[in-house]
């Protein structure tokens, strides 16, 4: 009886998770959405301390959004949406698809780690047009390093 209750609970939780995904409730990343619109107000909440320091030393005006704007092609138009694609716990990365007004789908991977018991972002890679599931997955897994920031240390 207890096993049936546990299985039923897992099915209900799985269905609730699926429905939330289908309805887009997990779709937007607040930090990424803000940065694509030039808003750096969420940096302290979502970026690691080391990454914030790196940004202040290597981005125009010390702003992450300014670094990102240098990666954006005017041909893409304006950012319209950010949708979560897939995460990789082993690679500590999350892949997002960003939709743009000129019908571009741009792949962005956020790198993360844990700091003081919470997940924080430590870098990014991508900001390139989607090339299909397999090529996009190479960004997620770290086989590709397009526009990686901070750059890969050899």
Image (cartoon, helix red, strand yellow):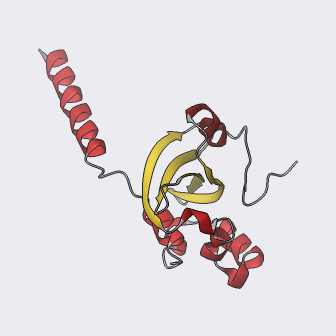
Q: Position of residue 8 (x, y in %)?
A: 16, 24
Q: Position of residue 17 (x, y in %)?
A: 27, 39
Count of labels in the image: 0
Q: Is residue 89 left or right of residue 67?
A: left
Residue for point 18% across, 31% down: 12
Residue 61 sits above or below residue 11 on the image:
below
Q: Position of residue 41 (x, y in %)?
A: 49, 79
**Residue 48 visible here:** no
**Residue 102 visible here:** yes
Q: Position of residue 131 (x, y in %)?
A: 61, 40
Q: Residue furthest left?
A: 1
Residue for point 49% across, 56% down: 98
Residue 54 image-quadrant placement: bottom right
Residue 55 sits above or below residue 110 on the image:
below
Residue 149 sits above or below residue 93 on the image:
below
Residue for point 60% across, 31% down: 134
- The residue nearer to you, when weighing 9 against 127, is 127
Residue 148 image-quadrant placement: bottom right
Residue 39 sits above or below residue 84 on the image:
below
Picture quarter with the N terminus: top left
Q: Residue furthest bottom?
A: 61
Residue for point 21% across, 21% down: 7
């Amino acid at each position: 009886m207890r096993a049936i209750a546990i299985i039923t609970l897992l099915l209900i939780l799985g269905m609730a998770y699926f429905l939330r995904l289908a309805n887009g409730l997990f779709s937007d990343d607040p930090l990424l959405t803000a940065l694509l619109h030039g808003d750096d107000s969420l940096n302290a909440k979502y970026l690691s301390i080391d990454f914030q320091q790196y940004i202040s030393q290597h981005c125009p005006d010390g702003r992450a959004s300014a670094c990102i704007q240098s990666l954006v092609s005017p041909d893409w138009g304006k950012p319209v949406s950010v949708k979560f694609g897939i995460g990789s716990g082993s690679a500590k990365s999350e892949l997002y698809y960003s939709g743009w007004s000129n019908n571009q789908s741009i792949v962005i991977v956020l790198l993360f780690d844990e700091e003081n018991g919470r997940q924080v972002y430590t870098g990014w890679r991508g900001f390139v047009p989607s090339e299909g599931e397999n090529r996009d997955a190479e960004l997620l897994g770290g086989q590709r390093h397009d526009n990686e920031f901070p750059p890969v240390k050899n």
